[in-house]
Amino acid sequence: MLAFSLCFVSFSLLFEMGNSYAGQLKTTRFEEVLHNSIEASLRSNNLVPRPIFSQLYLEAEQQLSSLEAGSRADNEEEEEEEEEEGSESSSPPLSYQMKPPPEGCCTTDGFCQAGKDLRLVSISNEHIEVPSGFLLVGAKSPNLPDHLLVCAVDKRFLPDDNGRNALLGFSGNCVGCGKKGFCYFTEFSNHINLKLTTQPKKQKHLKYYLVRNAQGTLTKGSVICWKGAEFRGRQSSSSTCSSTLFQLPESSGLSGSTSSEPPPAANPSAPAGTQQTAAAIDHIPPTAVFGSAVYNGKESPKQQLVKNNLSALTRPSVLGTLTNSGPPKKRHKGWSPESPSSTETWNMQLNPQVPNRIKNDGGSLSSLPHSALVGPASSPMVGSGEPVSVPDNLLKICKAKPVIFKGHGNFPYLCGNISDVIVSPLLHTCYRNSQSLSRAYEQYGASTIQPISEEMQLLLTVYYLVQLASDQVPLIEDLEQIFMRSWRESHLSEIRQYQQAIPQTFPQVPSQIAAVTSAQLPWLAGLAASSCNDSVHIIECSYSLAEGLSEMFKLLIEGKLIKTNYVVIICANRNRAIDSCIVITGKYQARVLSESMLTPSDYQKEVNYQLVTGKVETLGSFFSTLCPEGDIDLLLEKFYQENQGHISSSLSASVNKPTALHETGAAACTSYEIERHQIRPFQLAVAQKLLSHICSIADSSTQNLDLGSFEKIDFLICVPPSEVTYQQTLFHLWHSGILLELGLEKEHLTKQRVEQYVMKLDAEAQIKFKVFLQNSMQNPHTLFVLIHDHAHWDLMSAMHSLYPQTELSTGLVDRLLNCREVKEAPNIVTLHVTSFPYALQTQHTHISPYNEIHWPSSYSNGVDLYHENKKYFGLSEFIESTLSGHSIPLLRYDSSFEAMVMALGKRFPRLHSAVIRTFVLIQHYSAAMMAVCGLSQMKNYTSVETLEITQNLINSSRQCPSGHGLMVVLRIPCTPLAAVAYERLYNVRERLALEDNFEIILGNPNSGITIGKHFVEQLKVWQKIEDVDWRPQTYLELEGLPCILIFSGMDPQGESLPRSLRYCDLRLINSSSLVRTTLEQELGLAAYFVSSEIHTEKPVVNDVLESDPEKLSSTDNEDEEIATEGSTSEKRSPMKRERSCSHDSASSSLSSKASVTAFCSESSPPLIAAGDTAKSPHQVLSNSAEETTNNYEKQKQKVDKGAQTTISKHLPLVTEQLDTKQNIKSAQISITSSSSSPFSSSSSSSAPAHNSFILQTSQCSMTKASKQPPIVFLPKLVYDIITSTDSSGLPKSSSLLPYHSVMWASSFRPLMSKMMTCTEQSLYYRQWTVPKPIHMDYNNRNEGRMDTFHPRRLLLSGPPQVCNKNKIGKTGAYLQFLSILSRMLIRLTEVDVYDEEEININIKEESDQYYHQPGDMWPDLETFKKMPFDYTIHDPKYEDASLICSKLQTINSEDRSMSRRQEDMYTRRQTTRMRLSKYAAYNTYHHCEQCHQYMGFNPRYQLYESTLHAFAFSYSMLGEEIQLHFIIPKSKEHHFVFSQPGRQLESMRLPLVTDKSEDYIKSPTFTPTTGRHEHGLFNLYHAMDGASHLHVLVVKEYEMAIYKKYWPNHIMLVLPSIFNSAGVGAAHFLIKELSYHNLELERNRQEELGIKPQDIWPFIVISDDSCVMWNAVEVDCSGDRKSDYMWTERNVSLKQILQHIEATPNVTHYALIGMRKWSSKTNSAEIKEPFSCCHVHDFIMLNVDLTQNVQYNQNRFTCDDVDFNLRVHSAGLLISRFNHFSVMKKQIAVGGQRSFHVKSKVSDTPVSISPAQYICAPDSKHTFLAAPAQLLLEKYLQYHSHRFFPLSVKNYSHPVLSVDCYLNLGPQIAVCYMSSRPHSLNISSSGLTFSGLLLYLCDSFVVASFLKKFHFLKGATLCVICQDRNSLRQTVVRLELEDEWQFRLRDEFQTANAKEDRPLFFLTGRHI
């Protein structure tokens, strides 16, 4: 009774699951708890879900009792162990003394005594002879904890997977020396040198099985389960641990066993037949372990999701209990014969993750609605035991082929009429997988959790079958989930224990009350089946299954199983394990299951065979007998003869009328819009996401894509071999303009040129693809994008093929896109585009999850992100419409059609159901057309659905003045059947004279579109096409054409359908073999964009705002979608919804949902009223008159009164009068429909009518069709799957196997969650699916590597038919991606450079005297000395700087008045975009192959291998020794001199003045930089044209690490930490002083070598970090006069410029050499004089020898170069600017001067501080600023110097005298520079009167007498700046300033620094 009570609980559990299949999920407490448990398991970090089940099934008393029982069981087990080990085991362990080894033998650990190595790591690749019956195992040595020793042990002495059946004792061999026959483990442990200190025990030291992986390497396998450990299957050749995401640390390699080793069998005496059977079924190639892969060098994406949310990845999901069986521990103890033997153990070791991979001809397996009932449709499986004869004429008698599913144990041989039965191993595989599920627990140390027992498996299967309805088919996925739930239920205590991590003080064993014995099984199964009205029949056998099968065949022949759908045969022998099988005898179920086993190729062959051999003629003759009036063809002919003229004129009127109206201008439909190509916002968003991923690949450190090396884009689009898809893609490519934009084609495009960029994957594809590959190889600087559109099509491996070899296109994708050339080409990026990416998301995928792009959501948190006025209707919205609360279900099935198909299927068992369904549907369409045309008696021979479709189709064109109509898609996958349907419907249409009313189009993927001339002319008029030869080539061009499109082909191939599509008839899709991709692909044909602006005709949408529990995640977006109704402004409150009972036509025809008007407001009221419908032999009514009345009462309040009386005046031909009762019902239906349907027009006719045709107010049917989604008709089986939900609340279709050529990695997988995003779904499939051998990714394995992802392969997935009218979503998105990628590449090769005219040109001294000729290459020294120095600053970056006066100047005051605001300093400077030349300098983002070595990627030098060297020198002005640090890479050490003993840095090598080399730059280059580690232009490889040069980056100490990271191969000079806050002046100062000190060191060093000091090269280059390109002017002086010349400017290398300057005659006499700043506005006058004596900036050559006594001011932040230039000139040194050379400076928005921010030292909140606040009174409470004092001084003077020098503002003739320094006082004040140094060059001050005096940090050279020489205006102001207040007073006294200047106490200021930051102090005075 205890067993029975448990079974009852399981029964109730199954009852819930059975109901959920039908879409009637009961919200019981159990379901709620189960749902929460599964959801918690997905989100939990723990091993197993929280113990939710205990709330339902375990009371506290039961927990306590089971705990005690577990304790008792453990005690018993311990006692048994004590008996085995001896009494001394209870005493303290005695020390063990090993027998001393023989003298002279080897005693080394890891070696045997013969000296042979036994360590696994040493001999893993050696061939080891293993005797039969022996296994290789790993022994652990206490002295070698990290090693395993390899041993060969007789498997009889090893335990089975339950830890039992091991014989006592030992038998083993040494694999090292080959010694055999060790009978004692003690002896053996001595031989292999285990050196134990305790008694040797095999249980303690033999730890692991050893197996060989796919490479043949011996690796550690599973743990040996000693003593009742948990069930662990040994990993044989086909078993992997792929049910766990993360591998065990000790088993990181691939696991599997070599084919040379026999798979281990726990019971070697198992019957041979068992092993043969299993071998025949389960011969499966090994699959690789899926480890925690590294993607593109990064950690796995969503790692937390994998580790936490999908916790079930590392635990089993479907298990049950196994009875505590096995042989006794002692050989003398008895063994209960009731305990089942372990004959099935061997089978359990086979692959747990391959339920479907059964070889069948081509290795193909299609699947039933899930993966499910897949099996080979082949001869019966290999059996054993006595044969069973299959009776003759079985099919003829039973009307169906029985399908036999092998279950447990042995299966007998079948003989006789075996063609009439089908045998499948699928159920056996499911059972076996469920037995192996607890294996996932072994890494957690679980030892007590057992798998579900065989008895319980079979009993649960019976319960499941009992629950199935007569029209349902069993699904393996359902069964797997049942096993999982049952297993969890039976192990609640263990689950709780491992969740809460309770120490195992007293481990529990499985509760034995759950055990079902083999003796009880038949009785319990029979009890369960007793309530199902004989739907499940149980047969019990005594000896073998053969007995039961024979009885079953006998009952079938006798007709005693007519009501039985399933026969369960059980052979429960008490002496061994059970044998079982399940026979499907239900005609419907057997037919579906048998047909599901056909491959697509076999399916077409079978149908073709039946058509060719004429077997379908019996079906046709049967149809002709149905019609009492005679044969339909005779009726048609008779009708044609009688009504030929009349019908033609009346029905064609509507077709001819629009033309006439159009000609007269009376009326024309305006709804036909021709829209130009336009990019939608969401397409642009997708394109930008694609671009972002491309940039991520380029930016990664893997160097897989160098975007900087590409100059242009080229592409090739691969499409399936569908002519329509091909033309469709050409059309969009043509109109996108992308070819012209990319520069690939010229203005005049031809179709032939466009075709070069689209490749149809057919037999001719290889030629075009070869050209593509050749182009990619010949153009390495072009980035080729290979776009694989509709990428889920044809994923067959080139090595395997399902289809006949004649189909060359099969496997073509693999052959082309996966070829070695594509994979290795660095300039090819592959983009897969698909709506159904699941088959590309397996464990072996080529695509990194980082490279997946998912279609964005239109809505996020209620915000319309892309401002679309269209609402997308995909699968989730269609499902949503079937819920109650929605007015019109968009998904429906036709119950009368299904009933007729089922009846005919029983009558014609040998015909394929596709043939029957097609012929029935043709019959329905034919009858419907005849009924509409007046043959009213035919309406009983069609269905309401078909009649609705036909009537609306025929009437649609009559309601539009232009004749626009509806499209009906009739999907017939089988091409021969489609041809039959086309021929038949075409003939019926002709006989009914409807040939001008609507077109019938046969859509064959291999051919184009053919339509009649009349309809071509109509389309040309509508689309305003004048081309005489034009023909429609895409379905989109059929917009508005009334037609039936017979859509053939096994799968849609990317064809888009027009917006006039109204009905999508999918009743003929192959419902017996569906996977998720197939199903969503078929339903994707109806996916649609609906306008969300229309309020009168609102589409059906979701009415839950927060979350959609029914949302299908196949089309979900990354963000949570918010649905809107009609428009975003309208919201409907959430309401509780339950699914409607039925959506078939009969049940809804009397309600508001099924009348013709309800479905489509443009049609008339239904022709079939309730009374007539009830008479139809093919229709079943489920609604009553009361229901109709109730609906009418509920809705009548809302009906517009005007609508009730509106009747169109135009009535067509009266063909049938309806009686009064029918009229009333029709009126009720119409009124109800027009008010409740969102599609109904307010003007629709709803009054009683006496005609079968009622023309409503003229409104274009196509217009209304575009405002509402199409209506989809499905097979009943598919409808049930689509609309039912699984236990997680997700539609059942989402849990289908994703694709035909993949399979589940394990039965033990978590359910998908309805909250999963696309990314999470991808990770789910990547973990839980593996490709079959026929899949092209099958061989892409992790063979010990982590680089199976192709770095340049991306996947774009988006919902199907994401188009708006004629704009294709995904196609438009990737074309836009090509556009912005091209623009980005162009942008990458362009930079913004400053393009500004020189300033202060008008102040320049105009002179006719030119010192050099325009063509002179170098300056003449003597001539140059005569040139005057131009004090004026001309660099445009100093437009805001103070003018330097050199003489009496008259300057217009307005010239300098336009000053910029501080923030405009950089933003308003003029720039121009320039294309980078081959001589440009680059930042860190550039990494081409040529400069890899330069950047530090030289294989000779390890990355980042560099040394830090200190370099110290003293400098008297600083008063201390300066300590600098050099970071010198190994590759650059040759530039330096090191001391030999200690490798101390001594000096930097300098060349000689006389050195000449074409490939060497003599001057070291120093680049000071801050904040620009990424953007600084430090890569001078191309600028130097590859020449050898010395380049030093000068960085601050705190930035050293980041610069070293980005520039590992650059020499770095690290400034002392005291300069961390200093400006550029400090860097220049230290560069110069270091260089001079180094010059002295080199002179001393080389003087010892006999070289004169003056021969050492004294120049260095100081370059800004933004210098990007250099130009040279070429002057042509070939004119008649010397003054005539022509000049051109071109880009040249920096090498050429530097070598030219270094070659200047007498170059060492120049102190500074520079060049112009480039400007596009340079005129001839500026370069007529080739050399100037003026200021130089940005890029200078500095002679450190001549400028020894001239220093940069180390305190300066701005204008330090101007200050230095003035100092150099005043020292009498020469400054030369080469005007024929210019430097371009790039605009860099980060770093540099921008890195200095002035902020408050007190407050952390960022507050804007104006420069006026930079100074304050001494000792004031002013807010101190965190900025250097010098910076505050310079910024204050720049913006507020007018406060100190009021007389100087715009007074340029009276400048401010600035002594020994230049400070920028702003553009409105001029300064005059004077040097106080003796013998310095100064301008003449005679006649000059100054308006102010600036004394900045005066040194001792400034004396009172010097100042007294100058004259000042009365009231002129003085400003003295010193380091402290004391110095300030001393300076006033020393310079006798009080004699001429008046000071006041309040005129003293300081910079707004804190005292510790050493502020500067000011004193201002007034001239007396």
Image (cartoon, rainbow, N blue to C red):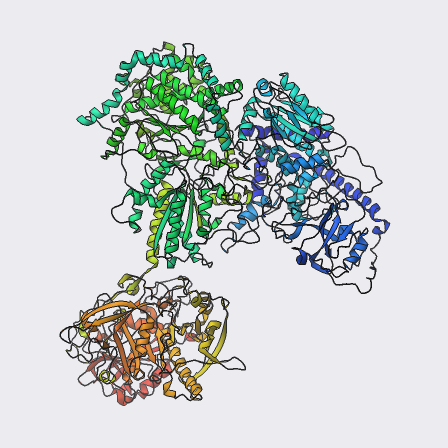
Q: Vertically, is 1463 above or below 903?
A: below
Q: Position of residue 1929 (x, y in %)?
A: 34, 84
Q: Where is residue 1596 in the image (x, y as percent from the top left)?
A: 43, 72
Q: Vertically, is 1604 above or below 598?
A: below
* Quarter of the rendering occupied by the C terminus: bottom left
Of residues 410 and 831, the one drawn nearer to the viewer in this rendering = 410
Q: Where is residue 765 in the image (x, y as percent from the top left)?
A: 40, 43
Of residues 1621 and 1774, the one drawn nearer to the viewer in this rendering = 1774
In the rendered image, the residue lying farthest to the right is 87
Q: Vertically, is 203 above or below 1487?
A: above
Of residues 118 and 100, the one drawn nearer to the viewer in this rendering = 118
| The image quarter in which residue 1945 lies | bottom left
Q: Where is residue 469 in the image (x, y as percent from the top left)?
A: 56, 24
| The image quarter in which residue 1916 lies | bottom left
Q: Is residue 682 visible?
A: no
| The image quarter in which residue 534 lies | top right
* Quarter of the rendering occupied by the N terminus: top right
Q: Vertically, is 1815 above or below 819?
A: below
Question: Does residue 211 appear to the left or right of 1163 in the view shown?
Answer: right
Question: Does residue 1498 appear to the left or right of 51 in the view shown?
Answer: left
Count of labels in the image:
0
Question: Does residue 1095 appear to the left or right of 1067 in the view shown?
Answer: left
Q: Can residue 1666 be seen in this view?
A: yes
Question: Does residue 67 appear to the left or right of 1510 in the view shown?
Answer: right
